[in-house]
Image (cartoon, rainbow, N blue to C red):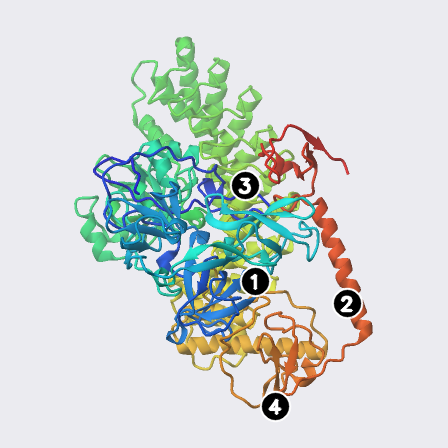
């Protein structure tokens, strides 16, 4: 049943799944993509009651919900299908399992169109989902991946927001059932239904349930006894290995997923929540199965057959692209309802209604991430947004690079001149928005008027951290133009305003005469300036002395708020400044732009004036209207002598942030200022790893903007963390790769950057190198000759005559340095899946193989330390039905690299080692599964003869490691899993001080916190 109260502009918004808002226990809090500024969390939504309105067309119940393209995702719950041929691996028909890995191209154990399933019984095996044209599994439930029909109510159980598949009666008007009610024979069995696999998929017509047989669903359900399972990561919460618990209920994880966690009470009396499909993890397995309902086998979709989807559109029917200008025009109550399942609701979002923002990105789930001028971001349902074609002052914009299109669009909008060609494709800042919508945009030292249709917004953290033109200052030029007018005026006119003209000309005698004649007019203005101001600017010392003796006001301001001391800074008059200060001038006086004389002197590059002002205790920490301190300006202009003066001022605060969130080290890294970086680090090395609000550190900024020298200083002198991550989980190496900065990539890898670090999408640097469109340009001859990275590739002897583009060059280099070419991202794609050129594909494999052989050679020679662990793509403890066939005969042993007949390991079915190397192996090095049998190619079994002394030592080591982990768990905060416990609540549970600040209820037992007892151990 559809429930809606949304009537506005003849538009009924599409509402559907999942609000990515996380609970607290016992899982460690994952990185939330929930609604919130720059990833901030939000309170779970509380949808208002809805009333019936007119009916939507079929399929309009949602538009931008999970899973993208109806694809297979980890966490889905499945049962055996019609092509099943694997006996009772699932413990018999009707037993349910969870998808824990999705196959990918190139894998020998989990190929494309296959999945790995963890059955509730504890068995983990792979199955066909289109592989060889067969479908072994049926999808029973996809609520675990967050599928929700947010505005649909089940007409049987009356639950609001159907989780998982939706079943809609084709006979009755507006009648819907959830999966549980449909499978339990609710409603008339003679009525035909339609199945909606997701909230935005096309309906699939089904035959009536009447006369169809049902299968009993079995697995982990309420009342079932369970023990810890394969993904258990919770220490001894269960009381220890083998302890039995009882499932209290199966429920969703906040608003993020449905029926994805189980609440279990253990024999020791504790009750906690454990994953049963949440994020594709399974923490439990049953001791004996239980019944969880029924299902009609004929009515379930085959796992691997994608549902056809509806298109995602905005409120006004347009699709969104990155950089689009949008605003939300809805009322708060309506927006709150729409946000359920689409980023969630945060009360602060109400402040952004009717405000214009920029589309930062479209999420995998189809929701729209919008960034506002204050760098705050919110995730919106696409139907809540309307496109607008406008920009705001201060925003970054990029000009189209198509000259013909720009010429055509400029007609009647500022027109076109050939000198504007240099701005094509460049990023600038909007200085002014005209009444007709045209924009004045600054590019470096030039400004042009553009039709907004020629421009696109520059969204995102990365662009906010890219170097752009500075805010132009017009005060100096204004002063000069006024003085030119004054000097051009006649000195013969006999009126008090003549005083200013004579002061501009430096006529001390005439000035003395006039002030004696008109002593009350000593501060009279001409062109808005006083005589003292113009004399100070022009450096007329005698005139200034005469005016001071006549009691001219030192603090008098012009229309811009500038006083005489500001004018000495504009005019580079150090000695006049010294005189005014000796007469009591306020060294920290602010003008209308919040600038002191020091700001102006620094901005102009007048070192002598800066020296005088600092000698008279000018406050070097005052910020102008942009939040910049004088040193921010000096760094931006690269005035070296001024930087040296300011960085040694005793009370300078290097942590001062401007309005864009850059402290002084961030600013130096952004601008590539080597001297400033060295000077700041010499006094404040602790800033090396300090992050901006978006998580960018100085090294991130240097890497993004191709400032290799600064990056080297930060690493070697600042001893910064080379693998530090921003809020999108990106390392400096990944940012350097996004921009194609080959020199920086080489430096960072040499200095220890993790080549397999993954960002929030699961992409490694190699994924990025092979997927970014802007990296497809070919390296120039100069770049090849000067690039250390390219020289490393050339010296390998593998390149031959192959011509590489920037992305391929970086990918080959990363492969040579140990990057995992089979590393799967969150979509199950490896870097090799992104390569379309077979020559490049083979080349990357060759560089990877070269690295592997070097590692094996080092191991053989005993010179290699233990390599860092990488993600294993064959999930642990996995048997395989679908290992790719391998040719009989000698193959290369992965341990000793000798050609030999390889031994087959059971149960994983991998053949990776010769008999000699396999003799002492206890686990398969490829999948980490414990080996139960080792079988030669003649089908005889290899006998194991482990050394008893080594075995005892190994057991002792494992016991000690287990005890250490237990001790660490007892004193570690269960929320952040980082800090030590420092507070205990009245219920006996505890947390660190930082986490407790936001808690009102205990995250373990949900009791209201009444007391907080601080620990001092």
| Quadrant housing residue 646 | top right
Q: CA distance from mark 1 to mark 4?
A: 33 Å
Give coordinates of residue 672: x percent, y percent. 51, 51
Q: Which residue is mark 3?
A: 663
**Front-most of residues 220 and 606:** 220
Give the vertical position of 435 relative to 553 (above or below).
Answer: below
Disc 1 is placed on an element classified as: loop
Which label sits in the foreground, 2 or 4? Answer: 4
Q: Which residue is mark 1?
A: 121
Q: Residue at x 31, y 53 (%)?
A: 189
Give coordinates of residue 417: x percent, y percent. 22, 50
| Quadrant housing residue 820 | bottom right
Q: CA distance from mark 1 to mark 3?
A: 55 Å
**Front-most of residues 582 and 205:** 205
Disc 4 is placed on an element classified as: loop
Whether residue 43 sits left or right of residue 619 in the image: it is left
The circle drawn on residue 938 is: 4
Which label sits in the foreground, 1 or 3? Answer: 1
Q: Which residue is mark 2?
A: 954
Which label sits in the foreground, 3 or 4? Answer: 4
Mark nearer the N terminus (3 vs 2): 3
Whether residue 309 sits left or right of residue 815 in the image: it is left
**Furthest-right residue in this view:** 949
Mark nearer the N terminus (1 vs 3): 1
């Amino acid at each position: 049943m559809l429930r809606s109260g949304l009537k506005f502009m003849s538009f009924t918004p599409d509402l559907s799944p999942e609000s990515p808002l996380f609970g607290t226990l016992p899982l460690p809090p994952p990185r939330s993509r929930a609604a919130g500024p720059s990833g901030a969390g939000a309170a779970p939504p509380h949808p208002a009651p809805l009333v019936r309105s007119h009916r939507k067309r079929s399929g309009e119940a949602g538009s931008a919900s999970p899973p993208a393209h109806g694809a297979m995702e980890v966490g889905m719950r499945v049962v055996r299908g019609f092509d099943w041929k694997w006996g009772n691996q699932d413990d018999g028909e009707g037993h349910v399992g969870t998808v824990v890995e999705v196959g990918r191209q190139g894998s020998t154990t989990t190929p494309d169109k296959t999945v790995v399933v963890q059955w509730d019984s504890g068995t983990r095996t792979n199955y066909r989902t289109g592989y060889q044209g067969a479908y072994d599994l049926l999808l029973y439930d996809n609520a675990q991946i967050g599928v929700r029909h947010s505005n649909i109510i089940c007409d049987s159980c009356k639950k609001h927001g159907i989780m998982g598949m939706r079943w809609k009666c084709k006979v009755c008007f507006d009648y819907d059932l959830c999966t549980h009610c449909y499978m339990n024979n609710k409603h008339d069995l003679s009525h035909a239904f339609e199945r909606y696999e997701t909230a935005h998929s096309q309906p699939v017509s089904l035959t009536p349930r009447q006369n169809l047989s049902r299968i009993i669903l079995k697995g982990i359900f309420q009342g079932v006894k369970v023990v810890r399972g394969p993904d258990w990561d919770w220490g001894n919460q269960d009381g220890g290995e083998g302890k039995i618990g009882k499932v209290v209920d199966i429920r969703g994880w906040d608003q993020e997923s449905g029926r994805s966690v189980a609440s279990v009470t253990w024999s020791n009396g504790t009750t906690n929540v454990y994953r049963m499909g949440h994020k594709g993890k399974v923490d439990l397995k049953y001791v004996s199965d239980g019944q969880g309902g029924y299902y009609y086998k004929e009515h379930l979709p085959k796992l691997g057959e994608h549902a056809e989807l509806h298109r995602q559109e905005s409120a006004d029917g347009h699709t969104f692209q990155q950089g689009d200008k949008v605003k939300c025009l809805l009322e708060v109550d309506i927006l709150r309802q729409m946000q359920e399942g689409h980023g969630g609701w945060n009360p602060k979002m109400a402040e952004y209604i009717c405000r214009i923002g920029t589309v930062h990105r479209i999420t995998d789930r189809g929701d729209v991430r919008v960034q506002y001028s204050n760098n705050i971001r919110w995730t919106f349902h696409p139907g809540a947004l309307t496109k607008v074609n406008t920009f705001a002052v201060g925003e970054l914009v990029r000009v189209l690079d198509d000259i013909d299109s720009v010429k055509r669009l400029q007609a009647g909008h500022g027109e076109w001149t050939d000198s504007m060609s240099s701005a094509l494709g460049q990023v600038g800042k909007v200085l002014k928005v005209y009444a007709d919508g045209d924009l004045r945009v600054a590019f470096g030292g030039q400004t042009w008027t553009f039709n907004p249709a020629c421009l696109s917004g520059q969204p995102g953290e990365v662009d906010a951290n890219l170097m752009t033109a500075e805010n132009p200052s017009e005060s100096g030029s204004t002063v000069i133009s006024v003085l030119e007018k004054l000097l051009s005026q006649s000195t013969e006119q006999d009126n008090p305003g003549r005083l200013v003209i004579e002061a501009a000309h430096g006529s001390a005698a005439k000035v003395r005469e006039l002030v004696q004649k008109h002593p009350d007019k000593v501060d009279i203005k001409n062109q808005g300036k006083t005589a003292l101001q113009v004399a100070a600017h022009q450096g007329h010392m005698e005139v200034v002395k005469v005016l001071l003796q006549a009691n001219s006001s030192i603090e008098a301001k012009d229309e811009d708020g500038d006083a005489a001391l500001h004018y000495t800074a504009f005019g580079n008059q150090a000695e006049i400044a010294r005189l005014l200060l000796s007469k009591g001038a306020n060294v920290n006086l602010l003008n209308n732009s919040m600038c002191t004389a020091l700001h102006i002197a620094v901005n102009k590059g007048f070192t002598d004036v800066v020296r005088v002002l600092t000698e008279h205790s000018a406050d070097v920490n005052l910020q102008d209207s942009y939040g910049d301190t004088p040193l921010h300006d000096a760094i931006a202009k690269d005035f070296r002598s001024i930087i040296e003066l300011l960085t040694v001022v005793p009370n300078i605060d290097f942590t001062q942030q401007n309005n864009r969130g850059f402290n002084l080290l961030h600013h130096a890294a952004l601008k590539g200022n080597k001297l400033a970086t060295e000077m700041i680090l010499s006094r404040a090395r602790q800033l090396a790893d300090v992050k901006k609000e978006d998580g960018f550190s100085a090294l991130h900024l240097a890497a993004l903007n191709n400032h290799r020298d600064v990056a080297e200083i930060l690493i070697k002198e600042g001893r910064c963390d080379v693998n530090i991550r921003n809020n999108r989980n990106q390392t400096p190496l990944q940012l350097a790769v996004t921009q194609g900065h080959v020199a920086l990539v080489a430096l960072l890898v040499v200095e220890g950057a993790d080549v397999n670090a993954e960002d929030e999408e699961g992409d490694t640097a190699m994924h990025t190198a092979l997927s970014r469109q802007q990296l497809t340009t070919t390296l120039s001859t100069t770049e090849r000759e000067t690039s250390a990275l390219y020289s490393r590739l050339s010296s390998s002897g593998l390149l031959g005559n192959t011509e590489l583009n920037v992305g391929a060059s970086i990918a080959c280099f990363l492969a040579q340095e140990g990057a995992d070419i089979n590393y799967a991202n969150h979509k199950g794609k490896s870097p090799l899946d992104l390569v379309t050129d077979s020559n490049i594909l083979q080349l990357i494999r060759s560089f990877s193989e070269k690295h592997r052989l070097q590692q094996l050679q080092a191991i053989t020679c005993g010179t290699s330390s233990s390599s860092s662990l990488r993600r294993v793509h064959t999930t642990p403890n996995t048997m395989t039905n679908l290992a790719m066939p391998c040719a009989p005969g000698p193959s290369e042993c992965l341990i000793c690299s000798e050609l030999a007949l390889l031994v087959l390991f059971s149960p994983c079915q991998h053949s990776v080692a010769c008999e000699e190397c396999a003799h002492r192996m206890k686990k398969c090095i490829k999948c980490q599964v414990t080996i139960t049998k080792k079988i030669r190619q003649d089908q005889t079994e290899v006998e194991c003869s482990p050394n008893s002394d080594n075995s005892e030592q190994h057991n002792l080591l494992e016991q000690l490691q287990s005890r250490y982990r237990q001790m660490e768990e007892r004193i570690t905060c269960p929320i952040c899993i980082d800090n030590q416990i420092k507070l205990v609540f009245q219920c006996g549970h505890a947390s660190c001080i930082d986490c407790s600040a936001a808690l009102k209820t205990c995250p373990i037992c949900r009791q209201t916190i009444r007391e907080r007892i601080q620990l001092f151990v």
